[in-house]
Amino acid sequence: MIPEDDDSLTQRAPRRWWQLAMVDVKPLRRHRDYRLLYIGRFVSYFGSMVTTVAFPYQVYQLTHSVLLVGFLGVIEFGAILVFSFVGGALADARDRRSLVLVSEAALMVCSLVLAVNAGLGRPQAWLLFAIAGAWGVLDAIQRPSLDAMLPRLVDREELAAAAALNSIRGNIGMILGPALGGVLIASFGLGATYIFDVGTFVVGLACLWLMHAVPPPVDAERPSLRRAVEGLRYAWSRQELLGTYAVDIIAMFFGMPFALFPAIAQGLGGARVLGLLYAAPAAGFLLFSLTSGWTSHVHRHGMGVVVAAVAWGIAIIGFGLAPNLATALSFLVLAGAADMMSGLFRSVIWNQTIPDSLRGRLAGIEMISYTSGPALGNFEAGVVASIFNLRVSIVSGGVLCVVGCVLCAVALPLFRAYDARLYGMAPDHGRQNVKREQE
């Protein structure tokens, strides 16, 4: 086991204003398994973001329907809704690293199928919808274990820093992946684009293989319906958790215009512009993450989530009213920064308040909250755009997002008033278990 640094002198030294803005990299320096997971997910997620552009683009090219592009999200969410409770229960009863490893291999197979289908003389549109369902199932199995590993790989006081680092990793992928995806599609075609994704999965699988096991909690039981219901009851009893779920669902359901991007790009220059539209929010994610050092000094995380969600809605309104591409991209960057702020504070609330024995099941519930909004929101955006037009769909969604988030904050006062200084953090038993395993 690698010895951990003594940061006591650093913690006692006063920090300048510019140091408060810098991202904290201590989790990467101190924890080998976190480094491996970080590298593997960085490469694998980058490839997935390339496919995130290619997949809806191919559906739109085959069907010429924004409604069907939005329906992809409904299919994926339906699978997540059914299987996320299974994934959460498994994450609390099985080795979490192994579950991530197996599901990652299955996702690689899905990308291989997409590459083969793209190489056919007449690619099958129905197969794309089948893959969307398979993605939902595999994501539902993988994500709870992936999320539940974080408190076991870093120390409790490093959770905010690790969340910021994870966001930087994802944001770089979301910026460069879509941009590269547009170039690959235009230059080499969809088949080569999907093959690129397959190659990145190989690196991710190798890093997962090199990690130590992440065994279930010492009090783990066999997965069962009773255990799943136990997780639901815990979530329902905690207003601060309900608030994180509700605000995110409202913001994403009403203010998620991503399904409209292929249609918007069609009139602005095609695939290369499509990549810019997808990359712009990620640029905002990255901008916020790289200046997120100050977030470790924020304690009113519930109010932070509300403010960020309202800012997201305002930025989406600006995007819908933008007169040109440059302005539209600027508002998408602002929206991405607001979304990153919301996601970071939601993650801290979850990891500070949920016991390790419930982490997997609650991660399954969290997954429903942060996937249901975008999935259903993309469908909602497609429906409104097909009835009215693109601008009405985007602007009306942003307005409803702002109103809904404010009402949610009023209805859930304990969530709004959440203060980490007044809330006893969950015991850090999980990480100690991993230390004993590795020793």
Image (tube, rainbow, N blue to C red):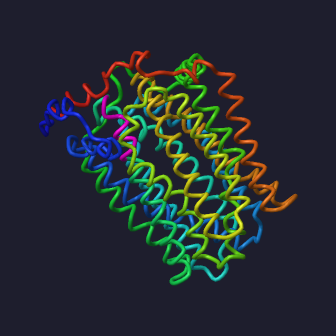
Determine which quarter of the picture holds residue 58: bottom right
Q: Please tell me whether residue 223 belongs to the stretch shown in magenta.
A: no
Q: Is residue 198 above or below residue 241?
A: below
Instruction: Identify the residue shown where x is 47% and y is 21%.
Output: 419
- Residue 314 appears left or right of 279: right
Q: Which residues are magenta?
A: 157-165
Query: Magenta stretch containing residue 158, yes or no?
Result: yes
Between 391 and 135, the one lying in front of the other is: 391
Residue 51: x and y in percent read 53, 65
Left or right relative to 437: residue 68: right
The residue nearer to you, when weighing 426 against 8, is 8
Question: Residue farthest to the front?
Answer: 17
Residue 62, quarter of picture = bottom right
* Position of residue 206 in the picture relative to residue 222 (left or right): left
Image location (x, y in percent) of residue 357:
41, 22
Residue 124: % across, % down? 67, 71
For the point 52% across and 67% down, which residue is it?
178
**Quadrant in the picture for the C terminus:** top left
Q: Is residue 46 above or below residue 294?
A: below
Furthest toward the right, the residue is 387
Residue occupying the point 82% across, 54% down: 384
- Quadrant assignment for the N terminus: top left
Dividing the picture into quarters, in which one does residue 393 lie?
bottom right
Residue drawn 58% across the image and 24% down it? 416
User: Relative to the observer, which residue lies in front, 44 or 420?
Assistant: 420
What secondary structure characterizes most of the magenta part? helix
